[in-house]
């Protein structure tokens, strides 16, 4: 099998969230999979290993080359010799904690609480602090944890209008929006979010794309994205966390959006 080749729209798209639900790999298995992914060198993967702060100690013997720190406690831990390259803060992160994270000089992704009053204003306010970027939760274990296409589209529009980079997390199990009968909810697709960001970059509405479950329409739209639009969209939508690192690659290949090269 040849090397995977990808357009700028799909390069360095997927962070490794194997430690997180629903996959919840044991640390040894997560690290072993990450090592295999590094050897595979797929351009679709960022090779950023997302790790909760409370589990950093388990990385001492086999630290991944690049770690995205997910703060799941109210303080910034000592990282010793670990190569932390970004920090994700929960919605309830305090101002002193935010400032402590900013002092590291690393990109800091903040997830304002979508259920709180003034959610979108809180997203926009991140732009006022250099070093802060946004994070949006796209799903969870209950239907209420899934933003509507209108909510997600408004988030994307604000980030694009302000030039505010963002990441997406949770619920993006497949490329295309689809119905989940267990939760009785439509799950967002990572391809939908990418294309919605492209639409916003081109000053077009992102809402219809986010609501589409038609894979053929989305594939046509993806092939039609100008290279400069794709690059700008990816400057803004930095990446998304996925429990599976193989499914996004397999689905993009099945849709004809990436291909096997000769390398």
Image (cartoon, rainbow, N blue to C red):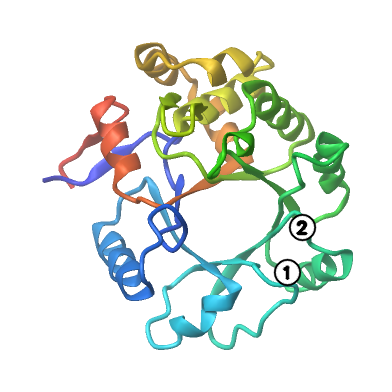
Relative horizontal placement of residue 43, taking residue 13 as reference (left or right): left
Secondary structure state at the residue bearing disc 1: loop
Q: Position of residue 129 (x, y in %)?
A: 86, 53
Q: Which quarter of the figure has residue 108?
A: bottom right
Check disc 2 and report the residue beneath it. 131
39 over 262 or under it: above or below: below
Relative horizontal placement of residue 221, taking residue 109 as reference (left or right): left
51 over 60 or under it: above or below: above
Looking at marks 1 and 2 on the same chain, the residue that comes earlier in the sequence is marked by 1
Q: CB atoms at circles 1 and 2 under 8 Å apart?
A: yes
Q: Nearer the viewer, residue 99 or 180?
A: 180
Residue visible at 52% across and 24% down in the picture = 195
Q: How many marks?
A: 2
Relative horizontal placement of residue 232, taking residue 225 as reference (left or right): right
Q: Position of residue 236 (x, y in %)?
A: 63, 39
Residue visible at 15% across and 45% down in the picture = 2
Q: Nearer the viewer, residue 162 or 249?
A: 249
Q: Position of residue 14 (x, y in %)?
A: 44, 48
Q: Which quarter of the figure has residue 177?
A: top left
Secondary structure state at the residue bearing disc 2: loop
Q: CA distance from mark 1 to mark 2?
A: 8 Å
**Mark 1 residue crowding within 10 angstroms, few (<14) / some (14–19) / many (20+):** few
216 over 35 or under it: above or below: above
User: As drawn, which residue projects farthest toward the left?
Assistant: 1
Q: Which mark is residue 68?
A: none
Residue visible at 45% across and 57% down in the picture = 17
Residue visible at 58% across and 77% down in the picture = 54
Q: Position of residue 39 (x, y in %)?
A: 25, 63
Q: Nearer the viewer, residue 217 or 7?
A: 217
Check disc 1 and report the residue beneath it. 105
């Amino acid at each position: 099998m040849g090397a995977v080749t990808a357009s700028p729209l799909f390069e360095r798209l997927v962070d490794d969230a194997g430690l997180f639900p629903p996959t919840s790999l044991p640390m040894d298995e997560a690290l072993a999979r990450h090592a295999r992914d590094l050897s595979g060198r797929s351009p679709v993967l960022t090779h950023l290993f997302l790790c909760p702060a409370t589990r950093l100690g388990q990385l001492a013997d086999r630290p991944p080359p690049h770690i995205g720190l997910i703060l799941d406690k109210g303080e910034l831990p000592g990282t010793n010799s670990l190569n932390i390259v970004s920090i994700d803060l929960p919605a309830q992160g305090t101002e002193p904690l935010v400032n402590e994270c900013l002092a590291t000089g690393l990109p800091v992704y903040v997830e304002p609480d979508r259920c709180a009053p003034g959610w979108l204003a809180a997203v926009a306010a991140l732009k006022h602090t250099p070093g802060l970027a946004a994070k949006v939760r796209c799903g969870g274990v209950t239907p209420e944890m899934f933003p509507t296409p209108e909510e997600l589209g408004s988030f994307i529009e604000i980030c694009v209008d302000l030039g505010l980079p963002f990441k997406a997390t949770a619920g993006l199990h497949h490329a295309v929006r689809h119905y989940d009968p267990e939760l009785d909810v439509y799950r967002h697709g990572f391809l939908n979010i990418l294309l919605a960001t492209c639409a916003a970059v081109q000053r077009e509405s992102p809402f219809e794309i986010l609501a589409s479950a038609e894979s053929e329409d989305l594939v046509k739209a993806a092939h039609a994205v100008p290279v400069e639009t794709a690059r700008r969209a990816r400057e803004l939508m930095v990446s998304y966390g996925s429990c599976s690192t193989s499914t996004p690659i397999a689905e993009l290949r099945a849709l004809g959006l990436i291909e096997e090269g000769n390398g």
